[in-house]
Amino acid sequence: MPGGAALAAEFAALRDHVGRAILGQANLIERLLIALLADGHLLVEGAPGLAKTTAIKQLAWGLEGDFHRVQFTPDLLPADLTGTEIYRPNDGSFRFDRGPIFHNLLLADEVNRAPAKVQSALLEAMGERQVTVGRETYPLPRLFLVMATQNPIEQEGTYPLPEAQLDRFLMHVRVDYPDAVTERAILHLNRDEALQDGPAPPAVRLSQTSIFAARRAIFGLYMAPGVEDYLVHLVMATRRPQDYAPELRDWLRFGASPRATLALDRCSRARAWLAGRDYVSPEDIQSVAPDVLRHRVLLSYESEAEGRHPDDFIAALLARVPVP
């Protein structure tokens, strides 16, 4: 099993591989690696053409694992995702034909275009790490990461994910357009890849053994009692913001669940480990807090009518909860 320095070098090589193919999306790449380390799933929201699909493909290319993409559509059925039992007339038995969810990395493209039954089948598998068909339950692979995408522009014919189901995602990441310098670099990269018949393959593929070892390593990082208190108080502030800022009392309908506390802990540890540190700092918590919390807080109708967004609420909490 690789040691700490070797593990860090392997993840750095994976980050470099994905970063060479995906320009201008450093935050998305870091979040993908954090999700991989923290054993969670990502919901990625952004306009078309921002390399969301390419990012997960490149991550899969750099790992020892299989990848599958499912295009979510209004006519998709749960069995199209989980699989179904096939009748065998020769002996009168049924054989389970596994669906695309039984892959290590799954891209659920435009997840909000599928009806609620399909979304529920996916999110149940994400939460329970198993699929039940008929009377049988089938475990999913130990390495199992879902990256779901949704388009914020087109809302007609979509089925927005309910807040209770959104809570199953470790992070909700937003991606935006690159700047002009990066756009020019993307243009040159596309030309180079066309001349070379595609992107360069990774030098080494990260093994699943290394991934599981790194997941154990992040829980060995030191978190000072004051930093741990800060993490807990930040989540508690999403439930009772008036204890920290009376003016935020009317902003909120529901705060974050205990699942948010666990997610914030794992994500901040993963970020610290990726940065090469053996301790978690308040800056690690502050960095991942918007992505961990934005889909777990529900603003009041009055706040939404005034044009406020969960990011505004989280930013206000980060500015008011005392930092150790």
Image (cartoon, grey):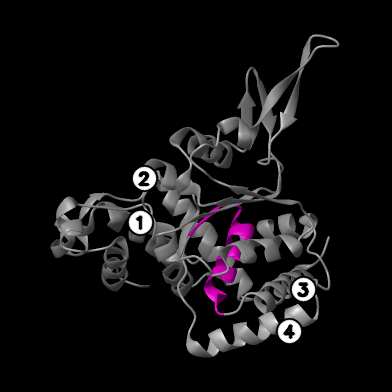
- Label 3, secondary structure: give it: loop
The residue wearing badge 1 is: 235
Residue at the farthest top position: 92
The residue wearing badge 2 is: 163
Q: Real-space Cα distance between discs 2 and 3?
A: 40 Å
Amino acid type at circle 3 is Gly
Residue 31 is covered by the magenta coloring: yes
Amino acid type at circle 1 is Val
Asked if marks 1 and 2 touch (Cβ < 8 Å), the reply is: no
The residue wearing badge 3 is: 198
Closer to the chain start, of discs 1 and 2, is 2
Amino acid type at circle 4 is Asp
Q: Real-space Cα distance between discs 4 and 2?
A: 43 Å
Q: Real-space Cα distance between discs 1 and 3?
A: 45 Å
Indicate the position of residue 113 as horizontal and vertical percent values.
Answer: 46, 46
Closer to the chain start, of discs 2 and 3, is 2
Q: Nearer the viewer, mark 2 or mark 3?
A: 3
Q: Quadrant of residue 84?
A: top right
Location of residue 50 with respect to 39 vertically, above or below:
below
Is 95 situated left or right of 251 in this image?
right
Nearer to the camera, 121 or 157: 157
Residue 47 is covered by the magenta coloring: no
Q: What numbered label is drawn on residue 192?
A: 4
Closer to the chain start, of discs 4 and 2, is 2
Q: Residue at x 70, y 83 (%)?
A: 191
Q: Nearer the viewer, mark 1 or mark 3?
A: 3
Q: Real-space Cα distance between discs 4 and 1?
A: 46 Å
Asked if marks 4 and 2 touch (Cβ < 8 Å), the reply is: no
- The residues colored magenta run 24-44
